[in-house]
Each structure stands twice: as C-alpha cells, then as structure tokens.
Image (spheres, grey):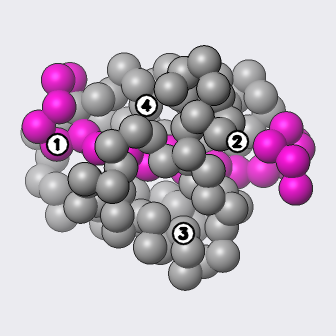
C-alpha cells in the first residue's frame, strides 16, 4: 500500500486533553491534508464535537469509529496521551498501517 492509494481509510489519533482548543486545529488541518491525498479520513473531532463530553464516552465512540480503518495517523505527542495510546494499541491489534504525521505530511509536523 502506498500512502496515496485511493479507497484507504485512516484514523487520526493524538493528544487532546489539557491542550489549547483540545488540539482540534491540528486534527482538522491534518484531516484536510489527508483528504487532499485521497484518504478517507476519520477525524475524532468530527466524531465527538462536544468539548464538554465525558472522556469515556469519547474514547468509546472513537474506538468504534476506528472500525473499518486500514491505517492510523499519530499526531505529535501521542505517546503522552492515554487515549491515543489506547487507539494505537487497537490499531496494532487490528493490523492497521501505523504512520506518524511527519511520515505522511512532512511539512505539517
């Protein structure tokens, strides 16, 4: 698989909690870049667009939204995010391709 192959579905994963604007601007910019690269994108900001939603409800919806994805894009700082670590483990378990943001979009990192 190449990163430019059409018909591929990618999930964006990264830190949100305790970051300004919940890091949504980076998630949204990444989604635009990936869509321009012909990925079908699952953006958790679009899955859970209520900043006051409980964490457990959000992570449960995010994991469900990952179903059918073939890849995951890890944003900077994902290693420090409990939720992103869970999503990374789920991606590994499901055999998804795992990319860091800088691997896919060098200018965005």
Instruction: Specify whether residue 98 is in view.
Output: yes
- Mark 1 and mark 2: span between their CA atoms? 25 Å
Can you say whether 65 is above or below 17 in the image? below
Is 75 within the magenta? Answer: no
- Mark 2 and mark 4: span between their CA atoms? 14 Å
Nearer the N terminus, badge 3 or badge 1? 1
- Per the picture, the main secondary structure of the magenta-coloured stretch is loop
Where does the magenta region start and end?
Answer: 1-21
* SS at mark 2 in the image: strand
| Front position among marks 2 and 4 | 4
Horizontal side of residue 81 vs 64, given as left or right: left
Residue 100 falls in which quadrant of the image? top right
* SS at mark 1 in the image: loop
Nearer the N terminus, badge 2 or badge 4? 4
Q: Which mark is residue 40?
A: 2
Q: Which mark is residue 17?
A: 1
């Amino acid at each position: 698989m190449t990163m430019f192959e059409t018909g591929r579905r990618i999930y964006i994963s990264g830190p949100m909690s305790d970051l300004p604007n919940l890091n949504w601007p980076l998630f949204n910019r990444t989604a635009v870049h990936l869509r321009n690269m012909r990925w079908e994108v699952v953006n958790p900001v679009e899955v859970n667009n209520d900043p006051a939603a409980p964490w457990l409800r959000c992570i449960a919806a995010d994991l469900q939204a990952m179903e059918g994805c073939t890849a995951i894009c890890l944003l900077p700082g994902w290693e420090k995010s409990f939720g992103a670590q869970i999503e990374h483990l789920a991606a590994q378990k499901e055999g998804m391709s795992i990319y860091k943001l800088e691997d896919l979009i060098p200018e965005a990192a």
